[in-house]
Amino acid sequence: MLTNSFIHIPGVGAVTEKRLWTAGLLDWHQVDSAGSCDIPAGSLMRFAGCMAESCCDHLDRNNPAYFSDHLPAKEHWRFFPQFRNP
């Protein structure tokens, strides 16, 4: 679930996240390979940088605090499955 979430990126809310999903970007790893979609190329580049930081610096290093700080409180359920076992 966490790698399908984009709303922890600054400036991305529920509407933009749905646009990403509709454009076929269903996972962090797909942002780099995004073909033609209605998301501006500059935004996709920024998203790709954020995804690399989220994945490499925080998910891979088992850092739930990053996601707690960057996801709205009502969306914390998104990272629970990833970090429920210490």
Image (cartoon, rainbow, N blue to C red):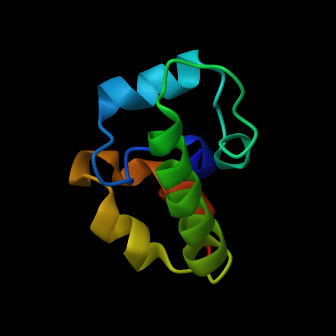
Residue 29 located left or right of residue 52 = right
x, y (%) of residue 51? 57, 58
Given residues 66 and 22, the one toward you in this image is: 22
Residue 42 position in % (x across, y down): 47, 43
Relative height, residue 82 to residue 85 (above, below): above
Hey, which quadrant is residue 43 in on the image? top left
Q: Is residue 40 left or right of residue 55?
A: left
* The one of 24 and 48 positioned closer to us in this rendering: 48
Residue ranking furthest to the left: 73
Name the spot of residue 70 as percent of width and height, x first.
32, 63
Residue 26 image position (x, y, % from top left): 64, 32
Query: Can residue 84 be seen from the camera position used here?
Result: no
Q: Quadrant of the C terminus?
A: bottom right
Residue pictured at 59% horizontal, 41% vertical: 4
User: How many marks can you see?
Assistant: 0
Residue at horizontal 66 percent and vertical 40 percent from the top: 27
Above or below residue 24? Residue 86 is below
Residue at point 40% right, 74% down?
66
Against 19, residue 2 (above or below) is: below
Query: Which residue does the image show at 53% across and 36% down from the upper left?
Result: 41
Query: Along the horizontal axis of the image, is 37 left or right of 33?
Result: left
Q: Nearer the viewer, residue 25 or 73?
A: 25
* 10, 42: nearer the viewer: 42
* Figure quadrant of the N terminus: top right
Splitting the image into 4 quarters, where does residue 71 fall?
Answer: bottom left
Residue 29 appears in the picture as rendered: yes
Residue 23 relative to residue 72: left or right: right
